[in-house]
Image (cartoon, rainbow, N blue to C red):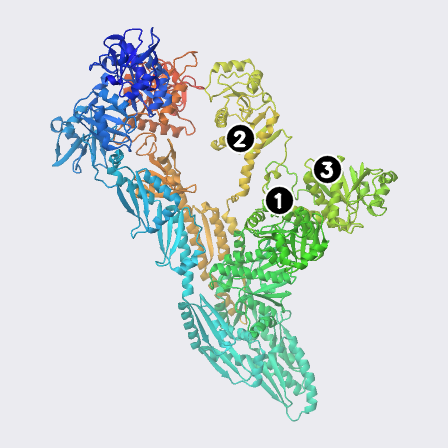
Amino acid sequence: MAGKTLILEGLTADLDEQIKLKLALYFKNKRRSGGEILELHADPTDKRRVALVYVDDEVRNKVLSKKTHQVDLKGSLGVVTLHVTLPEDVKSEPVLSSEAELVCDDETKEDAALLRVTSERRRESLETFFEQCVTDPILRKHGKNTWILQMSNKSDMESVCASNPQQYGISVEVYKEKEEEDLLDRRRYVLSGLDDGCPSDTISFYIHNCSHRAEHSWEAVGGDSIVVTFKVDIDGHQFMQKTFTKRFNNKRIEACRLELTKSVIVQGDMSQISEEFLTLYFSNKRRSGGDIIKSFVHVNQNKSIVITFEDWKVAQRVAEGKHTLMQKELVAQLFYPDLQWVLTGQTHLQSNFSTEIAVPVTPELLSFISRNEVFREELTSALQRVHAMVSFNIVSNHPQLELKMSMNKYSLGLLRHGPSWETNARREVQTYLEKYIVEHIPMEAEVWQAVKGSCPEVNVATALISFKIYTSELVVIGRREEVETLVKEIKSKMEKARDELQVVKNTIEKEIQLDSKERLDLTLELVGDELVNVDISKNNENFTIHLKGLSEKVQTAETLIQKVQDTLTSKKLDYSHNLTQFLQSLDLQKFQNDHFSQENIVAVLICSKESVTVLAKKGDIDRAEKKLMEVIKQEGISISAEYDKETFGEQWETFYADLTKELESTQNCQNVLIEFSGDKIELCGFCSVVDDVIAKVKGCLENKKVVTEDVPLKTVQEVEFVESFMKLSADPQLKALGVTILPCRSPQSPCLKVTATSDQIKEAIDVVNIHIRTITTRKYMYSKAGEAKILENNKLLLKMEAKGLGCNLKLSQQMSSQRFSYDLKGGVTLTLSQGNIAEQTSDALICPLVNMCFNNPVAQQFLENGGPEIKNAIDALEQLKQSLVEGDVIMTNAGTLKSKKLIYAAIPVWGKNNSDLNSTNLGTTVCHSLLKGANNQCDSVGMPALGCGTFGFPVKDSCEAIMKGISSFIGLGCGAMTTINLTESDPKTVEGFKSALEGLGYHPTDPTKTKTPLITSSPGASQTVTLPSLQVSNTKVIGRVSVILKKADITKENVDVIVTSSNQNLDLNTGVSGDILNAAGQSVVDECKKHGPQVVGNVVLTGGGNLKCKHIAQIAGPANITASILKVLQLCESKQAATVSIPTIGTGRGGRLPEDSAKAILQGVKKHILCTPCSSLKTIFVVAFEDRTYDGMKKYFNKPRHSKTHRAGTQLTAVPNALPPNQVKIKDALIELKKGNITVETVKAIVNSTNEDVNLKNGVSGAIFNAAGSAVEVECANIRPLRGNDAGVTSGGSLQCDFIIHIVGPKSVAQAVERVKNVLKHCEDKKIPSVSFPAIGTGGGGIKFPESVTALLLGIEDHLSKHKLSALKQIFLVVDQVKGMQECQQTLRSWTQLTQDTSDDDDSSNDSSCEEDNSGATTAEQLIGPVKVKLFCGDITKEKTDAIVSSTNTSLNLASGVSGAILKSAGQAVVDECNNLGNQPGDGVVITKPGNLAAKHIIHMVGQTKEKDIISSMLKVFKMCEDHKIQSVSFPALGTGAGKLHAVDVGNAMVTAVKEHIKITKTSSLKDIHIVIFQTNMFQDFRKHLNKKVTTQAKIRAVAPTQQPSMCLASGCGDVSFHKVEVEVLGCCSSNVAKVKKRVDDMVTNEWKLHQISSPYLSRLLTSEKQAIVALSRSLQVCVSVLAPDKATVSGKDFDALTMVHQIEKYLQNAKECETRREEEKRLWETVRWEVCDGETWAELDPAVSLDLEHVLHKKEPSISYTQQQRTYTVNLDKMERTDRNGTIARIKRTLKAGSEITVIEPPPNWDRMDNKTQDIVDLSPTSKQYKQVQANFLKTSKDPNKPTSATFTVVKIQRIQSKDQWQRYAVKKQMLDKIYPQNKNEIDLYHGTTAPICQKVNSYGFNRSFCGRNATMYGNGTYFAKQSWYSCNDTYSNPDAQGVKYMYQARVLVGKPCLGTPDMVEPAPLDPKNPLAGLHDCAVDNVQNPFVYVVFSDAGAYPEYLISFKAS
C-alpha cells in the first residue's frame, strides 16, 4: 500500500472531520486534483499531515506531478497551499491503519448533506450542473435514473435547491441514508455501464477484484446493468467505490445497492385456480408465508401473477417457500419491478439458444427486396434493432432470409437478448414482410399481351409487375397498399381483355350460297332483326351471305337462315312478254312495299328477260299471285279489217300523243305499257289504269268521243279509300256505262278521273258522286301522355280491324318541334333539331351506309326523297368491285333532294368491334365527311344522329364520337363551313342527344342574344360570333385560322410554305435551319446566295427545292419573332398560301423558353389576322422536334382559358361590351370611332397624313391645310422633307387644336403601324392627352378601311405597352364616309372580340389585371355574411357607432397611441371608471361608459401582439357586443402601434375574426363593423386583405360548380311536352266509323294507366332525383303531376307508367332511408358520442360515422372501415383503436351522454390504464409534457402582483389524481351544464390551496365543504378557488408541513353562469328571483364582470386534477 501512497503536507491546523471532508472532496475530484483517491486518513505521527492512498501508481504519479494544490478549506482557514510528496521523502513513514475509514464512513455521514437526485440526464451533465452550485460535489449511483449527491454542508444543499433544478429536468429531495438503509439489500448490487458489447467471461474477475474476492453470482438484466449477489456480507461502500474507480473494458462502472423487493412472481398452471382463491392463499401467513397483499397483477397473457406485499420480508418468505394449490405446483420468485426482472441468484454463462435462423420467403418477394437498395436498407435497419444481420439466399432451392445474431459469442448482450433473440428476430422480419404482398394472378400469355400496353403506371420504388410464361401468371410485388390498387385495376383490364380475346378465339366465318339476289335480300330482311352479335355481309354478285362472329352465334344464324330458306318457295308465273316487260320497268321494291307489305305478304318478284317468278313464304305464294292478279292485268284490242290501217295509224298517233300527255298529268305514265302492232293494241299495267286506257282506246276505235272529267275529293286519303275500299269499277251501273275511274293522288288536287263517252259522262259522274257522298271522315286527337305511343304500337292491328269494318284508319303524329343551337369554336354553329334529314336544305347531307346497302331507315328516306339516281355512285363502285370501309366517304349529286350534294359515309355498327374502336371509327367518319363538304365549298352540312337507331350505338356514345369528329375537323380549319345541322326524326334520340351534349359541357345558345361578327371578310358580310366552348388539344383558333402544334420533323411537312430562321447570310447550317437547307437541296442554297446578306428581321421567299412545299420563308435573324412572323404571313398572303409550317423559333441558339416562343408566334398570327380580314390562310402548323420544346409549347397551347370574373364592388378598366360599339379601351386610353370632319375636332392634336414635302393639297390633308391657314404652311417649311416613318409637329393654326402632327401617308399596314407609334411618341413628348387621326392610308395609300383601323389599334397597343404612365387618354379616329364608317365599326368590334379571346392566352395567370387600382382610395366596403365591414382612414374618436374599441394595457391606463387619444377624448370620468375596474388579465375585455365621445360605449381590450390572440380578443369583443345588443362597433388597427405587427397580418386577423364570429353566431345583433385607420399608409395593406378574403371566396364560387337551386318538381314536370297523334277514320257507314273510334278508345283505355303516389317524402327528393324524374318523363312520354307536397299522379302507357312509378318509389325509399338515418343520427347524437383521441383531447366523430360504429357494435362485428375527407380509417372495436392508411393508431371511446339510461363516462385521454382500480395517484415525471405544462402555469402566476417582493416557489412534485368515482360525478354534471349553456366556456382551470391532512381526503372523496372553505367565507360557504396560484400560495390557504412542503390543487371547475357571492351564502343565487322554477346560478364570484375568486357549492362541481407539492425558496 505504501507504494501507492502520497503524503500531504502544509495544513495550518490539526486535521479534524471538517477539514478531512473538504480534503476528501478535493482529492476525489480527478479533474481538480489530477487523480481520484481510494482512501484518506491522518498521519498518526503528525496531525497536520495526511496520507493519500491511490489504486495504482499511474494515478498517484499524476497527482504527484502537480506538486502543490490550492484547496479551499472554507471558514477561517480559507485557501491553503498544500504539497504532496512520496513517503520516502518525509522523515517518518505514516502508519496505515486497517481501521482507517473512508470519507463516507458513518461519522462523516452524520454531518454530510445528502440529496436524492432523479433525472434522465447523464452523469456528466449532472456533475456539470451541480458544480455550478457547490464545490467538489460527489455523485454516486443509487438506482435507475437515481443518484445520491453528497455535499460538505447544508448550505451547499440549500444552494442546489435554490438553483431551480426542476427546469432542467432534475428533481432533488433530501436523502436520509440511515432511514433507507434497512430497505436496501446488503448482498445485492446493481452494476450499470455494462453494455451489450462487454465480455461476459471476465465480469466475475472484475467483481472479485472490487470485492476482495468475495464469493458471488451475477445475472444480466435489462439496459446496461447486471445484478451481483454476494454469498456473504461485504463492505458495500468500499465495493461501490472500487467499481467506480476501476474501469471495466475501458468503461466506467457504477454500483448501487438494490432495494429489497416486496413483489414475487408466481408461475405455474393456474388455469383452474380463481383469482379469489390465489388471493386468499398468498395472504395467509400460515399456509404460504404471505400476508397483506398490496396489488395483484396478471402478466404474460395471464400465465403469471405478480403479487406485491406490504413488507419485503413477506416477499422473501414466499419466495423461499414451496407452494401447491389444487395439486398444482407453483413457483414463487422474487420480482424486482424497477428492473422488471426475476433474480435467481445464479450465474448463467452457458447459452443453449440459437444464433442463426432462416425465414422462408417467396422467391419473387425475396428478389424484389434484395434488388431494391431502399428496401434492403429498411430491413437491415429493422433487424439491427434486434441485434440481427441478414443475408439473402436467392440461389438455393429454398429461397430464404438468413438471420444471424450480430452479438459476440462471449458478450453480455448475448446473455441479455439470447433467450428472446429468435422470437424477436422472427417477429421483426414478419412485421417487415407484412408491409409487402405478392399477388399471383392467373393469366394467359395472350391476355397479358393484350393488357400489357394499358397496364397502370407503376412506381418502381414501391411495386413491380412481371409475367411468368411457364406458369401463365402475372406476379405483382410491392407495398401492400400499392399492390392492392394495382391488382384491382389489372383484374378489371384482364377480364375485359379476356372477353375480347374470347370473342376473337371463338370467332368463325361462314358463307352461305343462295341462288339469286332477290332470295338473298329477302332472306336478310327476314332474319335481320333476329340476328345479334353477328357480322353479316352479302355479295350481290355471288349471291352469298357472309357470317362472322362467335361460333355459337354463327351457328344460330346459320340455322335461322336455313329455317327461313325452308319456308321460302318460288313459282314461275305464266306472264306474257309484255307483262313481264311492264313489271321489269317498275320499281319492284316500291311495288312490293305498296302491295305486298301492306297486306303482310312476304314475297318478292324476280324478273328476268323472259319470265317473272314470285319468291315468297309458302303460305304467301298464292296470296302474292292473287294480289298480282288484282293489281295488274294485260288486255289486247284487235283492230278489225274494216278499219283503214293507214288512216287509223295516223289517227292512232294523234290519239296516243294525247293519251300520253294525260297519263303524265295524272302521274300514271309509268303505270301502263301500251304497244301498237298494226292489227292489235296490247295494254299491260295496273288494272285501273289499263281499264281507263282501254275505254279511251275503244272510244277511239268506235269513233266515239271519249271524255275524262275530274271528281274532286277532299284529301289524298279519300282517294286511297275510294281505290282500296269502294271498288267503283265493279259497280254494275258504272260497268254497264263502260266507265273507267283512275285515282289521282296529287296533294294539290286529289280527284277521281272518270272516263266515259261524251253522252254517258254526266250519268257516270252522278253515279260516282252518289258513292262519294257516302264517305264519312272523322278526325280525333289523342294528346295525353303515352296515348301516341299506344296507338303507334298498335297501328297495324287497328288498321286491320278498321279494314274489316270497311274503314280506313290513318295515324299522324303531331310531334312537338325541338330545335337547339350550340356555338362551337372556329365560327361553327351546331344545330340539333327534330325532323326528316332527307328534307334538309343544307349544302350537303350525310347518308350513313353499311356495306354499301340502303337497308337502314335513314338511307331509305334519302332514296325515297332523292330518287334512284342517287344510287348511281354506289352502283358504279359495285360494278368496279370496290367497297367502302369504315371511315370512307364519297360525294355525289343530290338527285331531287333539297341539298346541293350528298355524302355517303361508311359507318360502323355497334358491337362489331370493341366500343372504343367503334367510337373512334365513327368520329373519323364524321371528320372525313365534314372535310369533304368543306373542300367542296359547302357552308353547311346536315347529318342524322349517326350510329343511333339500327346501327346500335347508344345515344351518349354516338354523341361523344360525333363531337370528337367535329372537334378534329375544327382543329384542322373549318374552311367556309359555318353550320352543322344534326336532324333526327326520333324525339327520344333528340332529347338523349341534348342531354349527352350537356354532359359534355355544351349548352344551347340563348336565341335572344345578339351575335357580333368576328372577322369581316367583306363589307356587309354576315358571320357568326364564336363563343368558344370546345377546347381542341394543341390548337388555337384565331379568326378563321387554326394554329396547330405538332411534334414532327419540319422537313417532312407537306404545306404551301415552310418557315426557317436563319442568319443574315441565309446560310445557317446548324439546328433546324441547317436541316431545312440540307433537305431542300443545292438549288435553294444557290437561291439564298443570290439574295445576299439581309437586314436583321427581313424575310425572303425562295423555292421549296426538294421539300414538299412551294416556298421557304427565310427569316434573317436573330430577329423579333412577332414582327418576323407578321412579315412571313404577309408574304404568304401574296402567294395565296393556305397552309404554313413554322419551327419553334428562338428555342435553339436563341435560348428562348418554348412558352415564350409560342406566345410570340401566336401574337404575330393575331396581328396578321387583325390586319388581313380576307386572309387566304387556313392552317398554320407550329412544328417542334425535341420532346422538351414540344412539352413546353404544349403547356402554353393547352393552358386553360380563364373567364375573367370580376370582384363584387370593383370597377374594371376595360370590360368588353360595357362600352358603346364605337369605342374600345386599351390600357387607360379610350379609342373612339366617329363620323365627321377632322378639321372641326376640338382636341389637343390632329394628325395629318400628307406627302414627304408636307404640301399635299387634296383629300383630307388638303382640307386640314386649308382650315389651318397659311401660318401652318410656313411652319411646314421647317420640318420638310419627312423621311420614312418620321413625324413633324407644327402649331394648330386656325384649327381648334394646339398641334398638328404631320406624317407621310403609309402604303402598307406595317408602315401605318410604325407611323402611328411615332405620332404617339410625339404626343408623349408634348404631354398631349387627346389626339384625332384620319383613316390614314385609305386615300392614295391604297389601304382599306379595316386595315387602317387595325394598324391604328396595333400601333396604340404597342405604344401603350411600353409606356406605363402615358399622357394619352383619348384617341379619336375620324371617318367621313358612310361605307368606310361601317367597315371601321365592324373591324372595331372584331378587335374587341379577338383581343378578348386571345388575352386569356397572354394573361391567364394574371388575375390582378381584373382588379381596379384604387391606390389613391381611402375607403373600402365589403359585405361578410349579414355584416357590412367598412375600412377607411380617419380619427376613431370621432366615430358615432354604438361602441368604440380601445386596445390598451392590463391596467386600462395606456396613455399613448390610439388608446391614449380615446382616453383623452373620453375625459376623466372614463379614466376613473377604468381605475376602479383594476388590473385585467392578459386577454381581458371590459366595457365602460363613453364619457365625452359620441359613441354609447367604450370596449377596452388588452392589446395583443400575435395574430391568433387578436382573433381571440376580437371574438370576446363581439361576444360583449352581442350581450349588450350593440349594432355597430369601430376598431382601430389593432397591434400596429406598440404591438409592431404588420398591417397585412393585422388585416388578415381582423377579417378572420369577423368571419369566425359570423360562423358561430346564428343571429347577430351586429350590422356594421368599422375599421378606422389613422395612418393612411396602412390603408392599402388592409384593403388588399379585405378584398382578398372575399375575392378568394368569389373565385372558389366561380371555379367550383355552382350549386343548383332547389328544383320544383311540379314545374319541371309541367314543362314536359307530350306527343300528339291524330286519328283519321274514313268509311261509308257512320256506325262503322263509330265502331272504329270505339275500338281505338278501348285500345287506349286498356293500355293507358293512372297511378296515385302518396308520400310525405315527395317534397324531400334531391334535385338530381327530380331532374332524373323530369328526364324520364320526357323520354318515356309519361305525365307526372304533382298535386300537393305529398301527392302526385303518374299517367301514360301501362308499362312506361309502371316503370316511372317504380323509379319514383325507389327515390322515395331513398329519401325515407335518408330521413330515417338523419333522425337516427340525431337520436344517437343526443345519447351516445363516439370520440377519437387527438393528442391529449377527445374529438367527436361525425354523427354518420358514429351511427355506423353503433350498428357494428350491436352486430358484434370486430371492425369497420369508413372514409372521411378522402382518408380511409379502420376501427378495431375489440381494441377500441382507429388506424389510418399510414398505420397511425388513435384511441377511440364510446360515451353515453347525461340523460341517457346508463351514463358511461370515459376518463380523460391522458390517464394511465387503471384496469380494475377505482383510484390511482400517479407521480408525473419531471420530463413529461404534462409536468412541464402544469409547473409552468403554476410558476407563471405564483408571484403576488400586489407585493413588490414576494416569495418564489420551487415545485417538488406533481401528482395526477385518477379517481373514477369523482370523475364520473364531475363529468355528468359537466354534460348537463354543457347542454344548458352550449355556447359557454363552462369549465376552467383554477387553484385551491390545502394542507397535507386534507390532501388525502380530497384525493379519495373530492372537494367537500365540510373540510374546505374554512379559511374564507366572504363570498359564501363553499369551496374556494382562485384564478391565479399566488392567491392560494398564501400560508392561510396552503399551510406548509413539517418539512416546509406546501400543497395546492390545479382543479377543473364548472363555473357555468356565476353570480356575485355574499357572506354566509350556502347556495348560488336564483337565476330569476321571480321564478323559482328557473333554477340557480352555478357558482359565486367576487366580481361578475371580471371574476378572480370562485366559490363552488356542489361537491361534484370541481375535480382535483393535479396535486402540486412545492416549497418556498
Mark 2 or mark 1: whose residue is earlier in sequence: 1
Question: Is any atom of residue 12 visible in this view?
Answer: yes
In the rendered view, does 961 fall on the left or right side of 309? right
> 1718 or 1756, which lies in front?
1756
Secondary element at tag 1? helix
The amino acid type found where label 3 is placed reads Leu
Placement of the N terminus among the 4 image quadrants: top left
The residue indicated by pointer 1 is: 1402
Residue 849 position, x and y percent, is: 54, 67
> Pointer 1: residues within 10 angstroms few (<14), some, or many (20+)?
some
> Pointer 2: residues within 10 angstroms few (<14), some, or many (20+)?
some
In the rendered view, does 274 fall on the left or right side of 1856? left
Disc 2/disc 1 C-alpha distance (Å): 31 Å
> 730 or 1733, which lies in front?
1733
> Pointer 3: residues within 10 angstroms few (<14), some, or many (20+)?
many
The residue indicated by pointer 3 is: 1368
The count of marks equals: 3
> 1158 or 1771, which lies in front?
1158
Number of the label disc, if any, that sits on residue 1548: 2
